Each structure stands twice: as structure tokens, then as C-alpha cells.
Amino acid sequence: MKPDYLFILDEFLKIFKELEQRAYNPIQLQNEFYKRNQEFQKVWTNELTTEVIVKLKSDGYVRNYTDSYNETPLFKGDVKYYILTFEGLMFIENGGYEQREFKETQKITNQIAYNARMERYSSRLANWTEYLTYGTIGAAILIVAWGILTFFLERNHFH
């Protein structure tokens, strides 16, 4: 089973948003993810959990949980704890990674459709320009021919 990475990223953000606890270490996040998505237990690794957290952190949606006065970890030891940022909360409230991907795909699809319409309109405009050009030339020839015919008819008056 190939994991859907956008779904996984959104699930981790939802864990931060929905649970009562404020800060989480990677093992707690992984265990909660397993509870919600048991089908991933066979393919999931600690490295994937770390990669998900690094991605969420680099995108600015989670940050290390630290004491705001001296920027030192509140929990001692090698285990880091993470907290959802306000930007992360707003991001998941607006649909998260999957919704962003959907909107980007929709935007590209709309742009392709728009470009196709503009190409059709451009082709139609070129055709109409060509028709008008031929019509104008035809009208000019008729006007000149009429002028010549009128000139000779007025001069000769059928005499």
C-alpha cells in the first residue's frame, strides 16, 4: 500500500488540533496516528514520523514546545515535544494539504480550459478577420467597377 502523504500530513495536524494535550512527542503522535489509521501500522516507521514532523515544522505548522521566556525545552532529555502553531491551526481549519492540492489542481485545470477557450476565440477572430478582408476587397472591386461603368455610361449616354 502506497501511503497518501497529503492525507498523512493532514492527519498529524488533526491530531494536534483535536486532542486535549497541548504538546506531543513523536511517539505520542505516532501512537495516536496508529489508533486512527490502523492500516498504516505495517508500513509505518519511526523515520516516517520524524519526516512528517520535520515537514510540518519546515512549513511553519508546528514548532518545538519551549518555555517562552528563555527558549529552553520544558521537558528534559532527548525527546522533543511539538505544538501546533496558529498558522497550522488555520491551515488545517481550511482543509489542510489535501484541500490546498485540490485548489492548485483546480486552478491549473481552469487555466488550461481558459487557454483552450482563448485559443478557439483567437482562431475564430482570425477567421472573421480574413472574411472581412476578403469582403472589403470584394466591395472595393465592386465600387471601382460601378464607378467605371457609371463613368462610361454617363459619357456615352447610349448614343
Image (spheres, grey):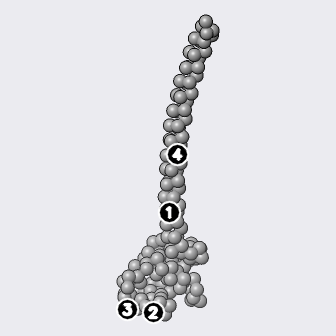
Q: Nearer the viewer, residue 18 or 158?
A: 158
Q: Secondary structure beneath disc 2?
A: helix
Q: Which residue is mark 4?
A: 124
Q: Please report whichever mark, 1 or 4, sits nearer to the chain's N-terminal start.
A: 1
Q: Which residue is mark 1?
A: 109
Q: Position of residue 145 (x, y in %)?
A: 55, 20
How far apart are labels 4 and 3 at the CA level? Answer: 58 Å
Element carrying mark 1: helix
Toward the front, the furthest residue is 159
- Relative placement, left or right, of 43 versus 64 is left
Vertical relation: 81 (above or below) 57 = below
- The answer to whether mark 1 and mark 2 are in CB contact below 8 A is no
Q: Nearer the viewer, residue 90 or 124?
A: 124
Q: Nearer the viewer, mark 1 or mark 4?
A: 4
Q: Quadrant of the N terminus?
A: bottom left
| Mark 2, residue position | 38
Q: Which sits in the foreground, 126 or 4?
A: 126
Q: Spatial distance from mark 2 to mark 4, Cα to Cα?
A: 57 Å
Element at label 3:
loop
Q: Residue at x 54, y 73 (%)?
A: 99
The disc labelled 2 sits on which kind of residue? Gln
Q: State whether residue 32 is above or below residue 2.
A: below
Q: Residues within 10 Å of mark 1 (few under 14, many from 20)?
A: few
Q: CA distance from mark 1 to mark 4?
A: 23 Å
Q: Which mark is residue 78?
A: none
Residue indicated by mark 3: 42
| Kind of residue indicated by mark 1 | Thr
Q: Are marks 2 and 4 in contact (CB under 8 Å)?
A: no
Q: Amino acid at mark 3?
A: Lys
> Along the polypeptide, which appears first: circle 4 or circle 3?
3
